[in-house]
Image (cartoon, rainbow, N blue to C red):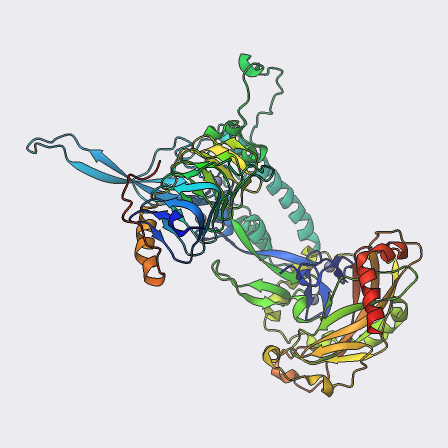
Amino acid sequence: MSKSEVKIYHGAIVCKETKIRGDVTIGSMTIVHPCATIIADAGPIVIGDGNIIEEQVVIINRLPENSQNKDDISTLRIGNNNVFEVGCIVETSSIGDNNVLECKSYIGPGIKLGVGCVIGAGCRLTLPETLPDNTLVYGKNCIRKIISDKPPNQNLQREFLTKVLPNYHHLKKSKTAIMQIAPQ
Amino acid sequence: MAHLSQQDVLIACSCGSLRPLIKLYFCRHCIVLRCGYCVSQEVDSIYCSNCLENLASSEAKLKKNRCGACFDCPCCFHTLTIRATTISRINPPVDGSPTPSKTSVKNYYLSCFFCRWTSRDAKIPDKLTATSSNWPEHENTYTARISSLIEYFKIITLRERLEKENRMFLHSSRRGYQHFSEKFGLTAMLARKRAGLPPLSLGRDDTSTLPHIAPSIASEHVEPLPDDVFTEAIDIVKLTSLPQRFGIPDLQPELISNLFPIHKQLFIKRSQRCRSCLHNIFKPEYGPASIKFKLHLAAYYYVPEIRLMEKIKLKRRQYTHLMLKISNPAQISTQIQFLQFEDVTDIVQNNEVFNFEEKKDDSIDTKSITNLAPIQKKTYPLEKSRRITFKTNGKINLPDVIISLPARDDTAEYDEANDSDMYQDNPSVIVWRKGNKVIVKFSVIPNNDVEDNEDIKIGFIMRYSYHGKIISPLEQKGNKDIRLLDIKIFISIRVCISPTELLTSGNYQIRTYLGKLMS
Ligand SMILES: [Zn+2]
Ligand SMILES: [Zn+2]
Ligand SMILES: [Zn+2]
Ligand SMILES: [Zn+2]
């Protein structure tokens, strides 16, 4: 893997221990914890601004199992201000803004999240579909409903992590040279 | 924790029901096992599990056993929390100041962190204070009807009780009445009655006249279904489930949007009392926040624990080794012996020497109990012991040894020294020993008539020496109070495999192959 493929925008906090492979772009103010894994095998992964990616999270853009066609490139796009809580696994191709993926949740390939969705702790979504905005999936039976309440604002948490993480971890250097407009 | 709730090893309670060790109590005074069926359960205190407020039983009854301040989510039944939002409001320009001023107001609403239901979904207006009271209540349309019925039946109970009392009063001499006052709240009335005074005329309590209640009338009129019921597609996301509807029995809403916060149900702390000797055997501390016990006579502090060591595969018409780990939980060493059911029957009676007369006044709380005893003896019917319904379909060979187990010593866990030399163990019986634990080798054979894949059930008696706890210093007369207790143990072993199946299984082939290599 050539090392120049990881693009980190100004203000993002990405720890050196984080496992990142392939063509990954991380937007500004996004925080990636040291034990997260981001793997872009099948195509690039573009992560927007202000996301929090916690420990043991796996974001993976993997080739579909039955397709041998290596040219079949698809981009995994993640919007802004999403929270990926500890241990969640993302294999989908598109996530919008302001979503919360609670601990140990799983989003399989082909499930598209819109805006303001909450995937409850331990919920597994495996069949391809597009979730309507503000969908909540909760409980062991993955019951769904539409919520009126917005997920709580993560600004304070993000500020705290921005201060604390550099004290205890070496960071991946952000490529200040590429001061372009953030992707999306 | 998984091993604690294991159902493989069951123990017969003195009443005959089979329970795992952790579900049993041990009455120190009767020196028998007790289970949840054969103890009397008493309510110690009533409290709210969320705000930990302690309520008197009368107050709890008044509030219908629900907390006034805490709510449960009507959607998923988790506890609702109060959440704050800041809303900035632009005030209209006041005379004198040219620009409109901005003020931010904190608003509070109830929210469920699990399913994100909020009181805004129920269209309950936000509150300006964070205090947990004064949330709007929905009015039950049948309140008047229900209360009139309750009133009616209260008077009927009162009347019947008085009649019964009168009858009993003639036969029995003076008896305490505390227990009735606690139970039915009839203090003043019954006190007067007992003292032989004429009842106070309280108008309402005039039991000769019953209030008039209107009987409910059956109606044939049923609301017709709405026209769109067959044409409109059902949106399941918006409909409530049955548990949600029954959570609010007076509303039973059909739509999620009509759900209403439920007052949190109160919890109780229970204490358990032995029904034959009336001693407490299990008593939690009174405060709702405390998780400690004043008295905690669980069987796993007194009875040696037996655990299955490994899953074994049984063969037909062949003995298979069964390893059982036995540990002594008591603070005093014990001796264990194993017996078949056939051996015991008559020996038990000879060995058990009950000396109740001596032990009568040795406990601290006996006094308070003896006061209440004459009444309470009436209220605790003793459980009739039932037959043990456990059909064994295998036979276990028991080693003819007496195993001595030292007392439990928590520091021994960290002690590397091997103390197995201290005991003259037969290595073909006792495979391993450390501290208060041993592994004993048994052998098991299934009966000839068992089906394939049927669990093999075996049973035997564990006889162990129990050293009666020294309760008062006066009783320290050495090791006088040793008695042998017989505990009936029932073990189920999963899945019996026939010899033909075993030959084909890979595991067996590898083992025989290895066996050939070794020889
Ligand atoms: Zn029992
Ligand atoms: Zn409460
Ligand atoms: Zn809820
Ligand atoms: Zn007892």
In the rendered image, is residue B329 in sight? yes
Residue B62 point in image, percent of width and height: 49, 43
Foreground pick, A61 / B469: A61
- Residue B436: percent from the left, percent from the top? 68, 77
Looking at the picture, tell me which residue is in the foreground, B432 or B94: B432
**Residue B68, above or below B242:** below
| Quarter of the image with the C terminus of chain A in it | top left
Looking at the image, which residue is at 56% across and 53% down? Answer: B182
Residue furthest left in the image: B96
Residue for point 53% across, 51% down: B267
Q: Please count the marks in the image.
A: 0
B365 relative to B14 in the view: left or right: left
Residue found at the far top of this picture: B227
Q: Which residue is drawn at 58% across and 15% down?
A: B230
Q: Position of residue B110 (x, y in %)?
A: 40, 40
Judge from the rendering whether residue A104 lies leftward or rightward of residue A97; answer left or right.
right
Provide residue B266's location: percent of width, then percent of height: 51, 48
User: Can residue A84 be seen at all in this image of the molecule?
Assistant: no
In the displayed structure, does residue B473 sit left or right of residue A154? Answer: right
Quadrant position of residue A48: top left
Residue A127 in the image: above or below residue B359: above
Looking at the picture, tell me which residue is in the foreground, B384 or B184. Answer: B384
Above or below A116: residue A5: below
Q: In the picture shown, does residue B269 fall above or below B92?
A: below
Left or right, residue A8 beside residue A135: left
